[in-house]
Image (tube, rainbow, N blue to C red):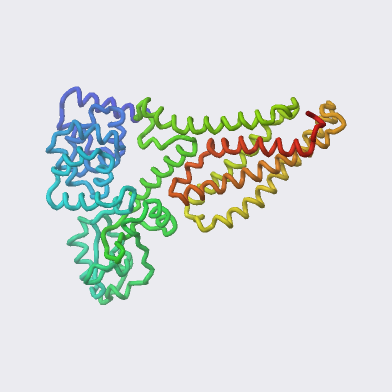
Amino acid sequence: MEELAMLVAHVEQLIDRGDRAELAEYLNELNISDVEELIDELPESGPLFLEILSLKRAVNVFRILDFPTQERIVKKLPNSKIRELLNEMPPDDRTSFFSELSGDVVKRLIILLTPEERKEALSLLGYPEDSVGRLMTPDYITVKEHWTMPRVLDHIRRYGSASETIDVLYVINAEGKLIDDIRIKDVLVAEPDTIVSDLIDNRLISLLANAPQEEAVTIFRMNNRVALPVVDENDIMLGIVTIDDILWVANEEYTEDMQRLGGTEALDEPYLDVSVFHLVKKRAGWLIVLFLGQLLTFFVLKNYESKFNALLVILMPVIMSSGGNSGTQASSLIIQAMAMGEVTLRDWWFVMRREILSGLLLGLILGVLGFLRIATEEAFQHAYGEYWYLVGTAIGLSLVGVVLWGSLVGAMLPFILRRFGADPASSSAPFVSTILDVTGLIIYFSFTTFILGDLLF
């Protein structure tokens, strides 16, 4: 923090002196992450920094800024600088930026692109939102099966500087169909008379352009790749997706899931950049739904009102919280497993069986503790009278029931939501807890009514 404060102070001095040449020289010597921090600390100077930086560094800085900052800077930059930035930006980063803008703004910016870049941008924007096609870049190196190593290396020298990465080369046939990929390491250590087909191992992993981005995240995670090729339904190669874009998507998905698990819609922007009105709008919907759900608790209590006993009312929070806790645990585990690709829709029956067993065992543990709690209180305070063991049994069985039910509800809700095309993270902790508060009370009063009868009412 102290180092950043000194950096900010020095840059402010250069700005005050109006020495753009010295400021440009100083900024070009900094790491791009340092320039990003300067823009965060001095937001009004962001456009100035991007304008005086060398083009390549300006593009690299612009790429790593969050969208609200990018939008604010673009509004204040001259068209000439915007034109340079957009035409120099990697296609995947430019597509990501355009995807966040309104249609009218995109139309205005598209005009600033060269004909070739404009065609490329429109092609990428033509893919569905949140599809792999929106992430890919057409800048990659392809080779043919019959090429020798010297020809491959000569091809890399000629076109490698325009490629997103040269760590992996892609083997295609005359029709552009992807055959396999090979590592640059294998090319460098191969004998000169080796041909490309000798390096093919037929372990190709590719992505479909129209596939969801979440699927790409899972494939990258499971295969430890820095880049993967993107193909259409006929295996024609269209582009590549690199790990930096996948990390960005994974971070976005994680943020959205955490917000939904907390019972709110995804904010889509950093918290401090969201207006209070927008924040209220995002949170109000779920609060209203949960409030209406909690009203069902009132009807359950009203139905059993004539059978209330002070001791049973005191023990209600224990029962309700146990069901909510078990449901939240199960829901969080299944959502995480789905996000990691460990569980799919077809695994629902296997998951249900596991949750029935684990829920029953967990319920028995809490049920025994509940019974012992009643027994201990009776031994020292004689709070329940001669029928204390019936009260203890009712509490114990109620805990078994609500924990078992909570585990099932928490585990199955993500599957139900995924089956109907919704985000499993929407079965958030507050949502699960609300359902289980209502059903937990029904289970509790059903057991106590059945076991105790008129003894305590």
> Is residue 128 found left or right of 441 in the rendered image?
left
> Is residue 271 found left or right of 56 in the rendered image?
right
Q: Position of residue 444 (x, y in %)?
A: 70, 37
Quadrant into which the N terminus falls: top left
- Residue drawn at (59%, 42%), measured in percent from left and top? 327
Residue 99 showing in the rendered view: yes
- Residue drawn at (58%, 57%), measured in percent from left and top? 350
> Is residue 263 found left or right of 306 in the rendered image?
left
- Residue drawn at (24%, 32%), measured in percent from left and top? 72
Question: Which of 439/244 is in front?
Answer: 439
| Residue that lies at the very extreme toward the right in this rendered image | 386
Query: In which quarter of the view is residue 165 placed?
Result: bottom left
Question: Which of 80/45 is in front?
Answer: 80
Residue 339 showing in the rendered view: no
> Is residue 191 found left or right of 449 in the rendered image?
left
- Residue drawn at (40%, 51%), measured in percent from left and top? 214
* Vertical comparison of 249 with 380: above or below: below
